[in-house]
Image (cartoon, rainbow, N blue to C red):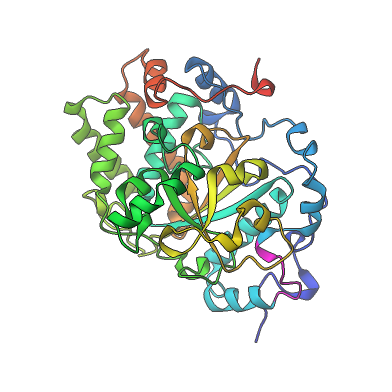
Amino acid sequence: GHPPFWLNVESKPDWWLPAVSVQPRSTMGCVHSEAEAPEKQLRAARRSRTQIAPVGHLPSKVSQTRSWVHDQSELGAQSFRGDPEGKHAARITQGYVMGDPHAEACFAELAQRECDFCGDWVVLYHSYRYAALLYEVQAAMANILFGFPSHSSPLPRLLGSDFLKVPDAASLVARLPRFERESPGKADHHADFRRVAISSMCSLMSSGPEVCIARTFVHGYSCKNVPYADLLASVLQACSVSSSQVASLVKAIVELAEEHGLDASMFGGKPVESGRSGHLMQVFVRRDVADTLAYAARPYGGVDSERMPLAQWLGGDRSLSKGQARIVANPANFLRTDQVRIFVASADPSFHERRKVFQQGLIQVLSAAIEPGRCASVARKVCSSVPPKTYEHEQD
């Protein structure tokens, strides 16, 4: 049959080849709006007594001093390793991507970004649907409080208090026996597991187990038995939004989501008209942090010992198309763009194009709900009085 658009031998795009540069183009796919200029991010971070390196402001030495950068760059994009002739990628893309112009464009951008980041970062993919509005609100709130680059990044978790006892993958794995006892066969469905971790696949060209990223792209992968509306309300209250304001604020958020084409059906709103309610989060984790935040997993969250340690497995010259992982989405790390970088592709073309405008609207609505002069105290509360540590290279 006809080859996938990016496998044409005569016109292969640059991302198919091993990366030439060891320096990731950190601004890839990130266009700063005037309202979210890097200077504003830095000012917000200083006000909250935290420092977050904005997109485009990472010093070159962060990557260039890593011993593995050159070798990993030579191996190329993680999702296409072990498939030198592109046969597996051809099967996946022909089956689920080809013929959908928006999906083709999204997958090409995701793949290009992998090539740009492959030297110093591992990449994991989180497919979701109903949680999208919650992730967007958390990102907008983090923008207000910490200068988080929400124009390019959703945020899966925000509240530091949820991570006091489970700050990393090791502490989560230690609790798996209890989760398994209380949720037999479905440890990662346990409420305490979901509170801190997200599920992911290890390749854009994943074929399992259980999830094929390309297949789930349009509709997303999600569970309905999650109290999304209650979670949103609890996040707003944790950010010092008064109880009397929560209902009206949620209504305003839902109306904004509906206006911009984001599924709000789990929050008392309408589903997206196109039916394309899926989202794909592309999570880059710096290689020396990967084993701190993630572990190789079997379906439903058990440890896949054969692929541990995860960072070593992800750094190999083999196919990574089969394998899951679980990521502890600790905001102490996820708010630090020198440790974790997040991007998103949305299946609905309208929302995908207008997401930055949606974020600006969210920021405006949420900012109005926080009392003037209280951002710093709210930021410390959200971080449980322990804001992310400042790195030397981020100090003034």
| Majority SS type along the magenta span | loop
* Percent of width and height locating residue 170: 50, 44
State the residue in front, 111 or 159: 159
Above or below residue 123? Residue 91 is below
Q: Is residue 361 visible in this depiction of the protein?
A: no
Residue 321 pos. (x, y %): 60, 68
Toward the left, the furthest residue is: 244
Q: In the image, residue 262 lies at what x, y percent?
A: 36, 52
Q: How many marks?
A: 0
Residue at image x 69%, y 48%?
117
Q: Is residue 269 visible?
A: yes
Where residue 88 sits, quadrant-wise, is: bottom right
Q: Residue at x 38, y 26 (%)?
A: 382
Q: Quadrant of residue 234?
A: top left
Q: Quadrant of the C terminus?
A: top right
Horizontally, is 217 left or right of 308 in the view?
left
Note whether 90 is above or below 303 in the view shown.
below
Q: Residue at x 68, y 78 (%)?
A: 87
In this rendered view, identify the residue nearer to me: 229 or 311.
Answer: 311
Q: Is residue 83 magenta?
A: yes
- The picture places residue 274, in percent across and down from the top left corner, at 36, 64
Instruction: Look at the image and tell me in which quarter the N terminus lies.
Output: bottom right
User: As rendered, which of 273 and 312 lies closer to the eye?
Assistant: 312
Q: Residue at x 39, y 18 (%)?
A: 375
Which residue is at the far bottom? Answer: 1
Q: What span is colored magenta in the figure?
A: 79-86
For the residue pair 276 and 47, the one nearer the viewer reads as 47
